[in-house]
Image (cartoon, coloured by chain):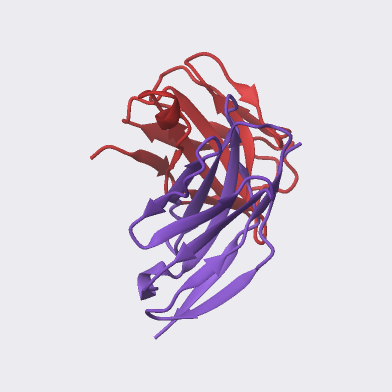
Chain colours: A red, B purple
Amino acid sequence: DGGITQSPKYLFRKEGQNVTLSCEQNLNHDAMYWYRQDPGQGLRLIYYSQIVNDFQKGDIAEGYSVSREKKESFPLTVTSAQKNPTAFYLCASSGPGGLLAKNIQYFGAGTRLSVL
Amino acid sequence: AQTVTQSQPEMSVQEAETVTLSCTYDTSESDYYLFWYKQPPSRQMILVIRQEAYKQQNATENRFSVNFQKAAKSFSLKISDSQLGDAAMYFCAYRMEYGNKLVFGAGTILRVKS
């Protein structure tokens, strides 16, 4: 089935540790995104990538890093510099098919990150 | 900067009745896109409906319709014949025509009573 796969579903981070969240899509989408969701707030953009080997910071990029070596994959690393990493993280992608299709973002099932 | 405001933290509706969720936004752009996403307890974000700002006609998808008032910068979602499966958090979102970022509101929790 086509879709966006995020793993793991739950992740725990120890203090000072870097952790990596996986996001894989088989929709042949060019653009991929990472959002953070906190209770009582909407989603906020961390990073996005429009093409392979290129990515841009979103609104809350500090303490996070990404890579885009393959079209299908856009992993997010939560570094030790992120002092409040506990949140729900959502990956999304959008693809070809005309301007309208490019404006629709499809989401994975998310990863819940907690600090031990 | 664009902002999206959902003024109703929680709403309740009786099964089979109609409910309207409110959303206002602030932008200086003339061309943009608006979306409603649903997030059920599974936390999976699901696109409900979208509206192109250049279209005057309100979008409709089965039991879901919007009331788009461009001058008032208002974009409400109407759910008709509410079903138990409609219970979820609903997010209103905005995107510039040539932008990459979705700007989300804080969400409205919809509860459906049987």
For image coordinates 76% across by 36% down, the residue present is B1
In the figure, A92 relative to B83: above or below? above
Q: In this rendering, does residue B81 appear at all?
A: yes
Which of the 4 quarters of the picture holds residue B79? bottom left
Viewport quadrant of the N terminus of chain A: top left
Q: How many marks?
A: 0
Q: In this rendering, does residue A75 appear at all?
A: no
Specify whether A25 is left or right of B75.
left
Question: How far across and how far down the image is residue A96, in percent?
Answer: 38, 23
Viewport quadrant of the C terminus of chain A: bottom right
- Give whichever of A80, B72 is nearer the camera: B72
Question: How far across and how far down the image is residue A67, in percent?
Answer: 54, 22
Specify whether A1 is left or right of A99.
left
Question: How far across and how far down the image is residue A4, in percent?
Answer: 37, 39
Specify whether A4 is left or right of B98.
left
Residue lying furthest left: A1
- Give whichever of B19, A28 is nearer the camera: B19
For image coordinates 60% across by 27% down, the residue present is B99
Residue lying furthest top: A53
- Give whichever of A52, B66 is nearer the camera: B66
For image coordinates 46% across by 51% down, the residue present is B45
Question: How far across and how far down the image is residue A79, in percent?
Answer: 66, 35
In the figure, B104 relative to A21: above or below? below
In the figure, B35 relative to B23: above or below? above
